[in-house]
Amino acid sequence: MNIAVCIKQVPSTETRITVSPQTNFVDLKDVEWVISPYDEYALEEALRIREKFTGTVTAFSFGPERVKSALKTALATGADNAVWISDQGLAANDPFVTARILAAALKQGGPSATPFDLTLCGTKAIDDDMGYVGIAVAEFLDLPHVSSVTRFELSEDRQRAKVHREIEGATEIIETSLPAVIMAQKGLNEPRYSTLRGMMLAGRKPIPELKLADLGLNPETLKPLTRVLRATLPPERKAGRIIEAPSPQEAVHELVRALREEAKVI
């Protein structure tokens, strides 16, 4: 099978996020960048499918040159190929624009121009939390899609897939034809770690660069549908209050009074 995986580079959850007072945007100077965890589930599922049915896995990422490090990680983890789509200074934070560009790259197929049988991506990215790009990619490619997938079963003839997805209070089972776009959710699998051998091999693999012109796209026509006006950190949490009382019963009485009269939550 010829499988594509779309990955996004995002700030690590361990990075301390700050907002620049000069720009009112997130200060990216000291950010540690990683592959979005949901995209890691997508990559792992692609590798498992390849191991069972054979084929190739190609990772795609759109953004500035730093995203090549995320693609190197994908190669070290087991992807066969990686493609970097240069943003060429284009703002990469609009999901509509990102989806158009990824779809144009996916239409070209893998390194041998072979059409993709399956495209995998995370159900959302942990930085903007929009959950929009995978759906829009499927729309641009005129393909079926399923989001929030926690189980993936490929038919023996590789023409159809049965997937489980989370809905409120239940699990929905959907059968779809292939090719399709599948958006991975937490619980789909347990991503593997890169190996030392994988890292060494990844260091020698070329990562071709695609520019917008290579995709037949003009930056002037890629108008974003959304614009981030400013970023703010959530307000600091107030210090906790310790209730002291002569007995547990009186402590409970005071706690209930404070919740009702002061916090007004009951």
Image (tube, helix red, strand yellow):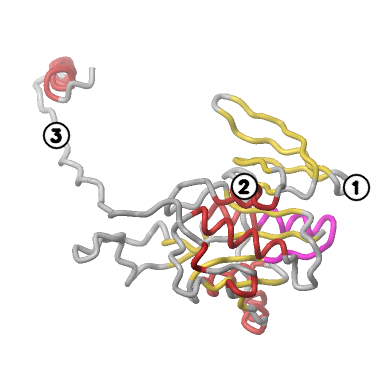
- Which amino acid does the dot numbered 2 rest on? Ala
Find disc 2 in the rendering and name its residue.
Answer: 184
SS assignment at label 3:
loop
The disc placed on residue 157 is 1
Neighbourhood count class around disc 3 (C-alpha, 10 Å): few under 14, some 14–19, many 20 upward: few
Residue 96 horizontal side relative to residue 16, left or right: right
- Which amino acid does the dot numbered 1 rest on? Asp
The answer for how far apart the CA atoms under marks 3 and 1 are is: 62 Å
Disc 3 to disc 1: CB gap under 8 Å:
no
With respect to residue 161, does 230 lie above or below?
below
- Say if the magenta span includes residue 69: no
The disc placed on residue 221 is none
- Which amino acid does the dot numbered 3 rest on? Arg
The residue positioned 59% from the left and 44% from the top of the image is: 185
Residue 72 pos. (x, y %): 59, 74
SS assignment at label 1:
loop
- Between 104 and 189, the one lying in front of the other is 104
The answer for how far apart the CA atoms under marks 2 and 1 are is: 22 Å
Q: Which residues are magenta?
A: 44-58
Specify which label sits upstream in the sequence, 2 or 1: 1
The residue positioned 24% from the left and 60% from the top of the image is: 24
State the quadrant of the C terminus: top left
